[in-house]
């Protein structure tokens, strides 16, 4: 048996579909015999073998993922390696992975591991013209990445989702060329009545007993907002990560794509207009910034992967705790400050009030417990190490750090592409301006009755962080606070309010007519919408309460240490 022991390697995803490009990772599946298991042999023995190879770098096992995977780079090429142990003592070299017999006597994680290859094979069999399918898919994947809606892990659509949508489109228009298919894509999926499912073939059941997507039988399947069903047994919803907020963002982008394609057909614009990048940091007035820190690069890689996989939960929890009235737009990329001495990266989420909601004076979005719950989930990481920290803070658009911009500085909003401005946003802007004129004399934030002695939030924040944070991290954060002092319109200017250590943790920010502050009242921002070129990171406050604030003062961010507890941010967002 030992002499006959072997394994077979398959590819799936974009590589198997023939739509991979430079820099893309290679999705790979290793199929082994029944006596070689995933937990010990794959994630321990093979992991150690790979760890000793010079060609292998950035090795990162993720055994607790929905589909267990080992990520690494081999000679600089990114590899996602899955493992499936099938009920055979010897795996034949010509194994037909599409045959249903490979599913006998295996568990659910193994089924999900095998599903990627089986789905890719079925897609290629079900499309009428493979070459037109590939060209169209390449185009739309590039569009999705440029528009910030390509990421399964953050609640948008990943490679297999886009492939299934394009494959269904090809079935609708079997003789259409790629240019027509791209145009029809936006028409079809703008008009699609979600949550009606997108399917390439009839959903089949089987006596093997694996769970198949069926909202009539399975109550949990009824909660899926954008079901895109895989064509091979067992049929699954490949887009279960989509939330109400990310569905809204994608539908808005489909509308933008539809309008541009209409203009292309009328020769008003060129095809390049379709692929203009989405200006995420100019699209919202308020953001959540999630900073993650680790002791070294290897720890940061593992810590970053864990936090990124849970960001979708933060979006869902905010939707849940605000009854869907506070909408989130997660950015699918992380950003790194190269000037930072510690191992650090940051994720961002755009925030806005749900359009069409009636504004109630004094209404608040209290997400303190939401953030606490999210942090507790993050800190339950099985492989947590000292130095792994997470900080969640609220920042305005003008305070977005400069390292997120490609040129290293903020561009003026006058250069915003035409495709970024749609009819709805224009109407919303007019409505917001008119409402500001009517409400200019109304204070946005409640003024607390009692004044208290002012203290320095910056010094207290750094003092709190030194208890639990490495020296080099504290040095970096001290630099952030020092830069805040130079910013004349920062998070909390000295004359904007008073803070005392005795007060309870709280903070307020107003959301006016769908956005979290009145931009025209700010320094550094003209009525025309030009942003200041200066960017200020969020201040870090410790055990403070915001009192007697001027209108449009920012949200207080509290990083609290002590009693062995991790740093906690508490805030209230007020309309």
Image (cartoon, rainbow, N blue to C red):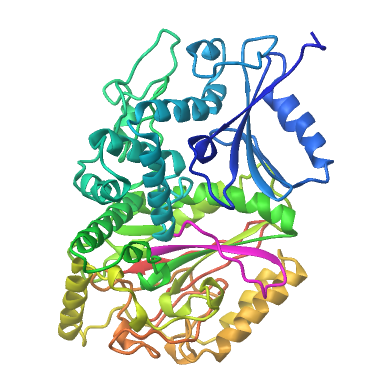
Which quadrant holds residue 286? bottom left
Please say if 130 is above or below 232. below
Q: Residue at x 74, y 18 (%)?
A: 6
Q: Residue at x 40, y 30 (%)?
A: 123
Q: Nearer the viewer, residue 196 or 21?
A: 21
Q: Nearer the viewer, residue 344 or 482?
A: 344
The quadrant of the rendering that contains the C terminus is bottom left
Q: Residue at x 28, y 46 (%)?
A: 181
Which quadrant holds residue 63? top right
Q: Which x, y percent locates residue 359?
A: 20, 67
Q: Which x, y percent locates residue 201?
A: 31, 24
Q: Nearer the viewer, residue 136 or 217?
A: 136
Is residue 346 magenta-colored? yes
Q: Magenta segment, which residues?
A: 331-350
Q: Which x, y percent locates residue 421?
A: 26, 71
Which quadrant holds residue 459? bottom right
Dominant secondary structure, magenta: loop
């Amino acid at each position: 048996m030992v002499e006959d022991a072997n394994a077979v390697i398959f590819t799936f995803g974009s590589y198997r579909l023939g739509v991979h490009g430079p820099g893309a990772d290679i999705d790979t599946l290793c199929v082994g015999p029944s006596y070689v298991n995933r937990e010990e042999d794959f994630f321990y023995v093979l992991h150690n073998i790979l760890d000793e190879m010079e060609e292998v770098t950035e090795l990162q096992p993720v055994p607790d993922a929905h589909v267990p995977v080992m990520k690494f780079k081999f000679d600089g090429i990114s590899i996602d390696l899955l493992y499936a142990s099938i009920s055979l003592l010897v795996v034949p070299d010509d194994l037909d992975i599409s045959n249903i017999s490979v599913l006998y006597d295996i568990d659910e994680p193994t089924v999900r591991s095998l599903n990627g290859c089986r789905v890719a094979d079925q897609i290629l069999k079900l499309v009428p013209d493979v070459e037109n399918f590939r060209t169209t898919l390449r185009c739309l994947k590039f569009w999705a990445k440029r528009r910030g809606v390509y990421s399964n892990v953050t609640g948008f659509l990943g490679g297999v989702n886009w492939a299934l949508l394009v494959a269904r489109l090809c079935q609708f228009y079997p003789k259409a060329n790629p240019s027509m298919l791209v145009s029809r894509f936006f028409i079809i999926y703008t008009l699609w009545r979600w949550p009606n499912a997108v399917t390439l073939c009839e959903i089949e059941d089987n006596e093997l007993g694996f769970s198949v997507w069926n909202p009539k039988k399975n109550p949990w399947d009824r909660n899926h907002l954008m079901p895109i069903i895989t064509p091979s047994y067992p049929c699954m919803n490949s887009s279960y990560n989509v939330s109400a907020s990310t569905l809204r963002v994608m539908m808005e982008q489909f509308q933008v794509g539809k309008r541009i394609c209409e203009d292309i057909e009328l020769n008003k614009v060129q095809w390049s207009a379709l692929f203009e990048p989405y200006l995420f940091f100019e699209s919202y007035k308020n953001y959540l910034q999630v900073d993650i820190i680790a002791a070294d690069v290897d720890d940061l890689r593992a810590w970053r992967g864990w936090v990124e996989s849970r960001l979708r939960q933060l979006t869902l929890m905010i939707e849940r705790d605000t009854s869907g009235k506070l909408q989130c737009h997660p950015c699918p990329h992380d950003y790194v400050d190269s000037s930072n001495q510690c191992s650090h990266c940051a994720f961002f989420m755009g925030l806005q009030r749900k359009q069409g909601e009636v504004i109630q004076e004094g209404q608040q979005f209290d997400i303190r417990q939401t953030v606490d719950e999210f942090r507790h989930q993050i800190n339950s990481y099985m492989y947590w190490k000292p130095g792994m920290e997470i900080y969640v803070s609220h920042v305005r658009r003008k305070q977005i750090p400069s390292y997120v911009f490609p040129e290293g500085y903020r561009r003026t909003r006058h250069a915003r592409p035409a495709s970024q401005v749609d009819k709805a946003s224009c109407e919303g802007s007019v409505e917001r301006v008119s409402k500001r004129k009517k409400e200019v004399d109304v204070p946005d934030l409640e003024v607390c009755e009692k004044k208290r002695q002012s203290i320095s939030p910056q010094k207290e924040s750094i003092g709190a962080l030194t208890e639990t944070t490495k020296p080099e991290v504290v040095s970096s954060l001290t630099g952030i606070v020092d830069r805040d002092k130079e910013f004349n319109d920062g998070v909390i200017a000295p004359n904007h309010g008073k803070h005392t250590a005795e007060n309870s943790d709280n903070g307020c920010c107003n959301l006016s007519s769908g956005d979290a502050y009145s931009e025209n009242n700010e320094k550094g921002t003209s009525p025309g919408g030009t942003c200041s070129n200066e960017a200020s990171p969020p201040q870090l406050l410790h055990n403070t309460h915001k009192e007697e604030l001027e209108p449009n003062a920012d949200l207080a961010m509290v990083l609290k240490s002590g009693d062995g507890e991790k740093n906690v941010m508490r805030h209230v967002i007020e309309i």
